[in-house]
Image (tube, helix red, strand yellow):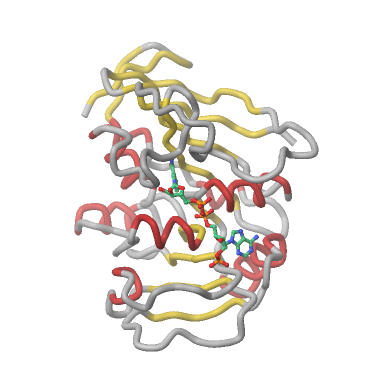
Amino acid sequence: MLLDRLYPRPGQVEVADVASGLDLGSRAPEGRPYVVLNMVASLDGKAAINGSTRGMGGEADRELFHNLRTQADALLVGAGTVRDERYGKAIKTDALRAKREQEGLAPEPVTVIVSFRGALPPDLPILQEPGAPVIVATGAAGELEGVAADVSYERTGDDLPLLLARLREDRGIRSILCEGGPTLNSHLLAAGLVDELFLSIDPVIVGGADALTLVAGRALAEPVRAELVSLLRSDEGLFGRWRLRG
Ligand SMILES: NC(=O)c1ccc[n+]([C@@H]2O[C@H](COP(=O)([O-])OP(=O)(O)OC[C@H]3O[C@@H](n4cnc5c(N)ncnc54)[C@H](OP(=O)(O)O)[C@@H]3O)[C@@H](O)[C@H]2O)c1
């Protein structure tokens, strides 16, 4: 699918090419992986419609979402999102698996699920995927019963800097694609652990003071500023890539 590139150089670009050859691992700072956040928002900054992203984002957003998964060693996601969205197999097609290998990555990313309480329903599709590489980052002591995925544990509690350090040092993970949700985002941003943001703007207004925005929780002690790397458009919305400062 072709998108119009508005910045930096006006022209046209295939969605798949937007998320190709990013070589995110080479940008990893000392002691932790490079962290890229990918989110979709409504025009009024909401992150979900009726508690789910299902009604948000069009075909281009979905294609970008799946192609971005070909660019990182690991996916990082909060337990709330995994539970609400019923996360399944990370890579959906052989073509996307082959793309990962061409990029020098393992055919499947490791899915790192952050769950302080370790409260994950064993029937989640990702946990029932035979041999799927999953790490549960948790403050709980137990292990999940009755799962088919290849699950291991990082007992890092709520300490995200420690988790990222362990992922880099012990597991060799140099690049992470974080897929939210807003609560996890707030903790990552507060700890200065987000390097980039891919943000799709879906031209819809959701409303509602209680609806989640991209970043939940308390206001950040310091606003995080970003600079635009690229901006694309289609009839389905705007697709920005931002580098966070600081
Ligand atoms: N627009 C988008 O692109 C987008 C992306 C993702 C999600 N969403 C939407 O966002 C909603 C879910 O987001 P959410 O904010 O409720 O949940 P979330 O951020 O996905 O997950 C929150 C949970 O993650 C765990 N957690 C978060 N920070 C932690 C830390 N520092 N240490 C240990 N555990 C931590 C806790 O799990 P436990 O409770 O298990 O302890 C917490 O309850 C859904 O409606 C989903 O559709 C939207």
Residue 230 picture location, percent across and down: 48, 23
Q: In which quarter of the image is the C terminus?
A: top right
Residue in view at x 37 percent, y 33 percent: 18
- Between 220 and 197, which is closer to the camera in this rendering? 220
- Between 167 and 234, which is closer to the camera in this rendering? 234
Residue in view at x 37 percent, y 17 percent: 5
Q: Quadrant of the N terminus?
A: top left
Q: Is residue 232 above or below residue 182?
A: above
Q: Quadrant of residue 13?
A: top left
Q: Is residue 210 above or below residue 126?
A: above
Q: Is residue 77 above or below residue 120?
A: above
- Between 56 and 93, which is closer to the camera in this rendering? 56
Count up the numbered dots.
0
Is 164 left, or right, of 42 in this rendering? right
Residue 32 picture location, percent across and down: 67, 58
Residue in view at x 20 percent, y 56 percent: 93
* Direction right: furthest residue: 221
Residue 45 picture location, percent across and down: 50, 28
Is 44 left, or right, of 128 in this rendering? right
Residue 50 picture location, percent across and down: 36, 42
Is 222 left, or right, of 12 in this rendering? right
Residue in view at x 46 percent, y 15 percent: 7
